[in-house]
Structure formats: structure tokens, C-alpha cells
Image: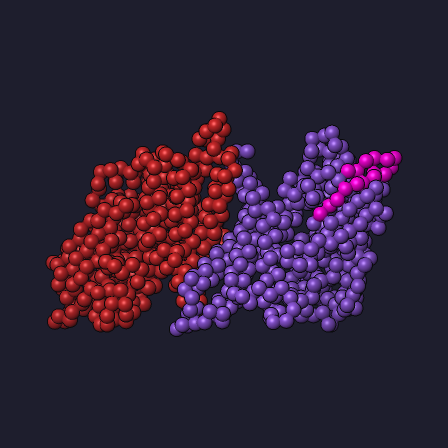
Chain colours: A red, B purple
């Protein structure tokens, strides 16, 4: 494993940074929030990202992708995370898109992947249920056999990027009880199908998230993604991949909020000198710097391990998510403290990073959850 | 066959013919390495044979010029030699501060006579060196040092005390910073001076640490006469030399903690800490029974792994041609703090078994862990405190104002 960017990767990262600086200042996110935009993102910008080849970068060439991997996708997502770009990358592309590419039938892939890679279609993965915290198998949504198909009933909450989605992948129970890994089946459901209601939830980070109600939604046999009752393993793999993508977004966010903090330390004067000359603040900044460096190494290692299909990939996903959770929250908390009073005001951007840091930390498991998972995977 | 391949084959053949058989496969074992010097004793006579043959071939200092006893090898050739030593698991023929600290300094700052006199004796392992920088009154603020050197004809008369002089009791010469101009600004009145430890007036007393015996000494100078010819670089310009050497020392320490310090846990199998925790606290359904310690072990393993990846990332970047910056300060801070956490955790996992100091009723391993715990507390002090490293990071990496 080489933890250094190739020339091609450097180029991808630089292109992404340039595009995001020009097209997605934090003011864009602020405007979407202030307007109460129902989607919370720009479908037009999503299509522009598709035109740059970003959405397909980690998909197979036979699906119309670039045939690269997470090692490349994380460079783009990091750039987006720097400016809090809210486009549906984690919730839709990485969760729904990857799940379809890996588990979908030929017909499902042909029907959906071209649209997803073109930024024209959005497929969200509705796995989260109220009260399940980070247990992927805590699924109570039932899929009752009905004729040749199934009827889905249940409730999902904070489904990422579900508002405006064209379809949902819904994990539901075809056997077993909540908590069982076996007996979970993934169904691809049209968002406009009778019995589906999608209601926007307003979260602290103002990202697209929804309460999804399924009330006797009819699904035929062709709508099953992966094997009957075998959705648990697929879900676990896809959430691992999405977790690395989210970690990359967090890496971008923590890097940017730290850069903001550094420039404030250099320019804000108190007692007649820049506050960055105070040793108490210098040491806090140096600590944040070190934590970000460790987070970066962890994200790079996890992406490469998953791309290579290495055995300890799952452990490294937990490493990346744990390091990014702690480091992003630390960087954001320190930013608000060092900005002082203005850091508490809505007018300044650092508060956005604090809110996003918390939301990302509490998605797919916080550091404590991933330490437990690491220990289990390490056999103790 | 390319020149480098030729060199590899020739060197391999030479090593196989000349390195004593008993030493193959020994590197990385408890073998401490050969420090050389006038007072050296060789418990294993083969170690001396290996030193002499390697020195004659220029392999104790492979990249130094041949005229000074080195091997005259290019960087690429030296890498091949190092690779072969690793492959054959041969211990280095010679180690010590002569090779790693004063030698490179002499090559850069010494005059021709000084190089001709000292470098060959270092290469042959005849003279062992120690470093005289810190003083009882000059720790982090090294430039405030007070050991005086007063000119008397073609000699200096040196008076003062150096502290933390590692292995001074076994060293033959010391390279020391002394104050030659008390009137100048503190960095500008310092001279870098070489002193033969056999000169009358030099005395050494070992320092007992909270962890017990240590290689550290105090070295006292009482009216010690040192020839002016032993000044390296210029009189009153020793700070320049010292800074160059300090950078070197920091890289060495960072390397030690980055590479050899907290290793990534083994693939498969449990880490030492996890196994210790499972043994001491018991297991329930394959898990360490105490969830708090389980969490701590995982946190430590994960941070160690993230740290190891960060060290690797810097090395990969250096190989790809990126300039290394002041990252060594980060490695010094983080690596030493991880090492301290490791021993704090071991001691708490051992419980009352960690309370042994010596004698019956305690396991040797546990006694050693206790001493290592105490010793590790010095890691964040020696070689530039963590606070000094954070200052360096803040100013030189983050660009914060002075």
C-alpha cells in the first residue's frame, strides 16, 4: 500500500479543489439553507459534477464509470467537504449507487446506473430505523409475501438524500427478528409508488434527510437487490464503503475549518498582538494539526484497503471513521473557541462546520462505536 | 548486469565470506551492538572480528569518503548494503554517536586535519564519543549554557558541568558546547569543542533515574586544558554547528519512535496489549471481560496504527520526491506520547503485579514493564520536550506568529 498520491490523483484533487472553490463557496450552502430549499442541494451542480466524470469515477467501465476506486473518489469528496457542498454523494451515490452496482440485477443496473452516473437520477438507501443507532441489522420493517411479490410496511428515519429521490433501496425483514444479520432483503422501490411517503426532516446540519413511511408497498420479484434474505452482508459492505466516503468529506471539512482557524489566529489582534502568538493557542492549533494528519493517513489507508479487497479493510474503515469523528469535532470545537464570540454567531461559517462535524460523527457510528467494532474484528 | 547489480552480488559474496558465521541471523535479537572505544570489551570475540573486517572494507561508515576510512559508496550502493545486512540479519558492525552525530558534523564543519585525525578512528571503532550539550541550568533553553572556556595561549581552560551525557562513563572523547564570550548575545558566544576525556580535570558520575540505572551521566570539567586546535568551525560560532547536529538528533529520535516504536498490531492474532488484557481481566464470549479496558486497548491500537500510517505517508512522499518539512516534530510528540500511554496501560493492566521493584515474588517481565513505564516518562522531555516540539510545529509548519 502506497500512501502517496500518484500524478493522476494529484490532478484529480487539484481539479476538484478548483471546481469547488469556483462553483461552491460556503455562501451557496448558506443560501440553500436560508431559502429553506426543499432538496437542500442543486440538481444542476450535480449534473455538472457528472459531466466532469466525478460521479462515475469509482464505478466499473462496463457500467459507464472510469474504473478507478475509492482512492480517487475520496479526493473529490474531500474537496466538496471543504466547502460543505450538500450534493447527494454520500447518501445516494455511495449508498444507493454502490449497492445497485454490486447487488443489482443486470436489468436493475441497466435501468438505473446510467441515470445515476449522469446526475439525472437519485437512488437513496433507506436503512436507518428509529432507535436503531448504528446497528445495521436492527430492522423491523416487514416484507410480507403477497402473491408473487412482497408487501413492505415500516418506518425509516433520517434517510439521507431521500427527498427528491427517484427510488429507494429499502432493507426489510423477510425472516428473523430485529438484530439478526440473516433474513434481511433489499428491495428497490419507486419513490412515487403507492404507500410510500417521504417527509423532509430538518436536521442541525440542514442536509437532505427524510422520514420515510412504507404502508403496504407492493414489490415484485424483480425489485429484489441481491439475494433473498442475504441483504445483511450486502448492507454491511455498502455501508463500509459509504463510511469511507463520508470520512473523506469529514477530512475536507476539518481541513477547511482548521485553515479558517489558522488565518483567524494570524489576523485577529488582542492586547496589541495577533492572538496566534499566544502559546496556549499555538499548542491547541498544533494538536489539531496532528489529529488531522492522522485522520488523513487513516482515510487514505482505508480507501486503498477496500479497493484492494484486503482482509482487514473493515478494521481500517473503523479506524478512518473513528479518527475522522474525533478530529472533525475537535477541529470544529477549537475553531469556535478560538474565534470567540463571533464563532457563536450564525453570521460566521465556523458554526456550520461544527454542526456538520456532529452530524457526520453520529452517522455510521461514532468513535466509541468503531473502537468496539475494531476490538471485535481484532478478536478481543 | 548493471553496476548496482554487480555491486549487490560482490557485496553479498564479500559478506558471506567475511562476516563471522555466528552473527548471521543475529540482528534484532538482544545483541546490543558494538560501540567500540578504548574501554570496549568484547564478550563475543566474533563481534570484534566483524568490526575489524567491516572497517577495513569501509562498511562501518559506508558513505563517508575513503580517505577518511569510509566506504566511498553512493547513496544507492549504501541502500543495497543496508538491505543485504537486513536480509542476512547481520547486526551493524559498529554503532554509536561517532558515526551518527560527530562524524557527519566533522565532515561538514571540520578542517582537513580534524577530519584526518578523528574520522578514521571513528570508522575503526577505536574512539567512542559522547555529547556534552545540556547543563543543570540549561535544558530547553540550551543557549543559556554556562560551561566556560577561557583562552590561555593556544589552549582553552574549561570549567563547568554537562548533564545527560549518555555513556560518558564509557566514552573516550566528548563534543561539547562551551561559552567563550560571556559578553556576546547568548547564541553568539558559544564554541563547539572536542575534548579528550582522559585530560586531567574531567570526571564523570552516573545518574540514577526514577527507573533505576541509566546510561546518563554528569560530566564535570575542572580547569581542563583543551588545545584551541580542537575548535570545530569558528570560535564563538558553535551554535551553527550545534543546531545542525540537533536537527540530526531529532530525526534519529523520531525515526526510532516512528519506525521501531509502536508497531502496527499483527495481522490475525491479538496484539501484546490485547492478549495481556484478556489474560489479566478474563474473557467473556471471546471479549476482554472489562469493557472499559477493552475500549482503552482498542483506542491505543487504533491511534498507533494511524500514527504508523502517518509515518509511512511521510516516507512514501519523500520517496516520491516531496521535501520533508518539520514533520519530525510531530512524530517526536505523538510517538513519545503513544509510548507513554502504552506503558501506563500495561502497568494498569498488570494491577498490583506492576508494583514490584526487585527481588522475589515478581515476574521478570512485570519488573521490566514497571521500569519501562518509569523510563518512558522521560520520552517527552529528552531530545526536545513536547512543548518545544509544539512550538516548532506552530511556528514552522503552521506559520503562526512569534
Which corner quadrant holds the N terminus of chain B?
bottom right
Residue B197 in picture, x, y percent from top left: 81, 50
Q: Residue at x 29, y 53 (%)?
A: A91
Q: Residue at x 82, y 57 (%)?
A: B38
Relative placement, left or right, of B236 versus A160 is right
Q: Is residue B150 magenta?
A: yes
Q: Which residues are magenta?
A: B148-163
Please indicate, yes or no, whether residue B385 appears anywhere in the rendered image.
yes
Q: Residue at x 69, y 33 (%)?
A: B186
Q: Residue at x 13, y 70 (%)?
A: A146
Which corner quadrant holds the C terminus of chain B?
top right
Residue B276 in picture, x, y percent from top left: 51, 68
Seen from the viewer's position, the closer of residues B322 and B235 is: B235
Q: Is residue A59 above or below residue A207?
A: below
* Secondary structure mostly seen in the magenta stretch: strand
Q: Is residue A130 magenta?
A: no
Task: Please count the marks in the image.
Answer: 0
The quadrant in which residue A242 appears is bottom left
Most extreme residue toward the top, as rendered?
A: A272
Relative placement, left or right, of A47 versus B235 is left
Residue B51 in picture, x, y percent from top left: 77, 62
Please indicate, yes or no, whether residue A289 appears anywhere in the rendered image.
no
Residue B205 in picture, x, y percent from top left: 76, 52
Relative placement, left or right, of B374 versus A349 is right
Most extreme residue toward the right, as rendered?
A: B153
Amino acid at each position: 500500500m502506497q500512501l502517496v498520491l500518484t500524478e493522476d490523483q494529484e490532478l484529480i484533487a487539484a481539479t476538484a479543489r478548483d471546481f469547488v472553490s469556483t462553483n461552491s463557496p460556503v455562501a451557496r450552502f448558506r443560501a440553500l439553507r436560508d431559502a429553506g430549499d426543499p432538496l437542500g442541494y442543486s440538481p444542476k451542480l450535480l449534473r455538472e459534477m457528472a459531466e466532469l466524470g466525478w460521479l462515475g469515477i469509482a464505478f466499473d467501465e462496463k457500467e459507464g464509470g472510469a474504473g478507478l476506486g475509492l482512492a480517487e473518489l475520496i479526493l473529490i469528496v474531500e474537496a466538496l467537504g471543504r466547502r460543505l457542498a450538500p450534493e447527494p454523494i454520500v447518501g445516494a451515490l455511495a449508498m444507493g449507487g454502490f449497492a445497485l452496482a454490486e447487488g443489482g440485477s443486470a436489468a436493475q443496473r441497466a435501468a438505473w446506473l446510467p441515470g445515476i452516473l449522469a446526475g439525472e437520477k437519485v437512488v437513496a438507501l433507506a436503512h436507518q430505523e428509529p432507535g436503531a443507532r448504528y446497528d445495521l441489522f436492527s430492522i423491523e420493517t416487514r416484507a410480507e409475501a403477497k402473491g408473487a411479490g412482497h408487501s413492505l410496511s415500516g418506518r425509516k428515519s433520517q434517510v439521507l438524500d431521500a427527498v427528491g429521490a427517484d427510488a429507494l433501496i429499502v432493507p426489510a425483514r423477510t425472516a428473523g427478528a430485529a438484530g439478526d444479520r440473516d433474513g434481511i432483503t433489499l428491495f428497490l422501490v419507486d419513490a412515487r409508488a403507492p404507500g410510500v411517503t417521504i417527509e423532509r426532516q430538518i436536521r442541525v446540519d440542514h442536509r437532505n434527510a427524510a422520514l420515510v413511511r412504507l404502508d403496504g408497498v407492493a414489490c415484485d420479484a424483480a425489485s429484489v437487490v441481491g439475494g433473498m434474505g442475504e441483504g445483511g452482508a450486502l448492507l454491511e459492505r455498502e455501508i463500509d464503503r459509504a463510511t469511507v466516503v463520508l470520512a473523506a468529506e469529514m477530512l475536507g471539512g476539518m481541513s477547511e475549518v482548521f485553515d479558517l482557524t489558522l488565518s483567524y489566529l494570524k489576523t485577529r489582534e488582542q492586547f496589541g498582538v495577533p492572538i496566534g502568538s499566544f502559546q496556549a493557542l499555538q499548542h491547541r492549533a498544533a494538536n489539531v494539526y496532528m489529529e488531522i494528519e492522522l485522520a488523513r493517513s487513516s482515510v487514505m489507508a482505508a480507501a486503498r484497503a477496500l479497493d484492494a479487497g484486503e482482509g482487514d479493510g473493515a478494521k481500517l474503515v473503523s479506524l478512518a471513521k473513528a479518527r475522522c469523528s474525533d478530529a472533525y469535532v475537535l477541529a470544529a470545537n477549537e475553531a469556535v473557541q478560538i474565534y470567540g464570540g463571533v464563532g457563536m454567531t450564525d453570521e460566521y461559517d465556523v458554526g456550520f462546520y461544527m454542526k456538520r462535524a456532529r452530524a457526520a460523527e453520529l452517522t455510521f457510528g461514532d468513535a466509541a462505536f468503531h473502537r468496539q467494532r475494531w476490538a471485535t474484528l481484532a478478536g478481543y | 548486469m548493471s553496476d548496482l547489480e554487480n555491486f549487490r552480488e560482490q557485496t553479498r559474496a564479500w559478506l558471506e565470506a567475511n562476516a563471522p558465521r555466528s552473527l548471521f541471523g543475529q540482528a534484532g535479537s538482544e545483541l546490543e551492538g558494538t560501540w567500540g572505544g578504548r574501554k570496549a570489551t568484547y564478550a563475543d570475540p566474533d563481534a570484534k572480528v566483524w568490526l575489524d573486517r567491516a572497517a577495513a572494507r569501509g562498511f562501518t561508515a559506508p558513505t563517508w569518503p575513503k580517505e577518511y576510512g569510509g566506504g566511498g559508496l553512493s547513496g544507492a550502493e549504501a541502500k543495497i548494503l543496508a538491505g543485504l545486512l537486513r536480509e542476512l540479519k547481520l547486526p551493524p558492525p559498529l554503532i554509536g554517536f561517532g558515526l551518527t552525530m560527530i562524524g557527519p558534523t566533522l565532515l561538514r564543519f571540520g578542517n582537513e586535519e580534524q577530519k584526518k585525525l578523528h574520522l578514521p578512528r571513528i570508522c575503526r571503532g577505536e574512539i567512542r564519543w559522547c555529547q556534552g550539550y545540556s547543563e543543570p541550568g540549561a535544558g530547553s533553553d540550551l543557549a543559556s549554557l554556562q560551561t566556560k572556556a577561557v583562552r590561555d595561549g593556544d589552549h582553552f581552560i574549561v570549567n563547568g558541568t554537562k548533564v545527560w551525557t549518555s555513556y560518558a562513563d564509557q566514552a573516550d572523547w566528548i563534543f561539547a558546547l562551551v561559552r567563550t564570550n560571556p559578553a556576546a548575545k547568548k547564541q553568539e558566544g558559544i564554541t563547539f569543542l572536542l575534548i579528550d576525556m582522559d585530560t586531567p580535570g574531567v570526571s564523570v558520575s552516573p545518574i540514577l533515574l526514577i527507573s533505576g540505572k541509566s546510561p546518563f551521566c554528569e560530566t564535570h570539567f575542572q580547569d581542563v586544558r583543551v588545545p584551541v586546535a580542537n575548535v570545530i568551525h569558528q570560535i564563538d560560532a558553535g551554535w551553527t554547528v550545534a543546531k545542525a547536529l540537533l536537527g540530526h538528533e531529532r530525526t534519529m529520535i523520531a525515526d526510532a519512535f516512528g519506525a521501531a516504536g509502536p508497531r502496527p498490531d499483527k495481522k490475525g492474532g491479538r496484539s501484546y496489549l490485547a492478549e495481556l488484557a484478556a489474560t489479566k481481566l478474563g474473557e467473556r464470549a471471546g471479549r476482554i471481560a472489562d469493557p472499559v479496558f477493552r475500549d482503552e486497548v482498542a483506542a491505543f491500537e487504533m491511534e498507533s496504527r494511524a500514527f504508523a500510517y502517518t509515518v509511512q505517508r511521510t516516507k512514501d512522499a519523500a520517496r516520491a520526491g516531496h521535501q520533508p518539512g518539520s514533520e519530525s516534530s510531530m512524530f517526536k510528540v505523538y510517538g513519545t506520547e503513544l509510548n507513554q500511554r502504552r506503558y501506563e496501560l500495561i502497568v494498569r493492566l498488570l494491577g498490583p503485579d506492576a508494583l514490584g521493584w526487585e527481588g522475589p515474588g515478581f515476574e521478570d517481565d512485570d519488573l521490566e514493564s514497571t521500569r519501562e513505564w518509569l523510563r518512558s516518562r522521560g520520552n517527552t522531555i529528552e531530545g526536545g520536550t513536547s512543548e518545544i516540539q509544539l512550538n516548532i510545529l506552530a511556528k514552522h509548519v503552521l506559520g503562526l506568529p512569534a
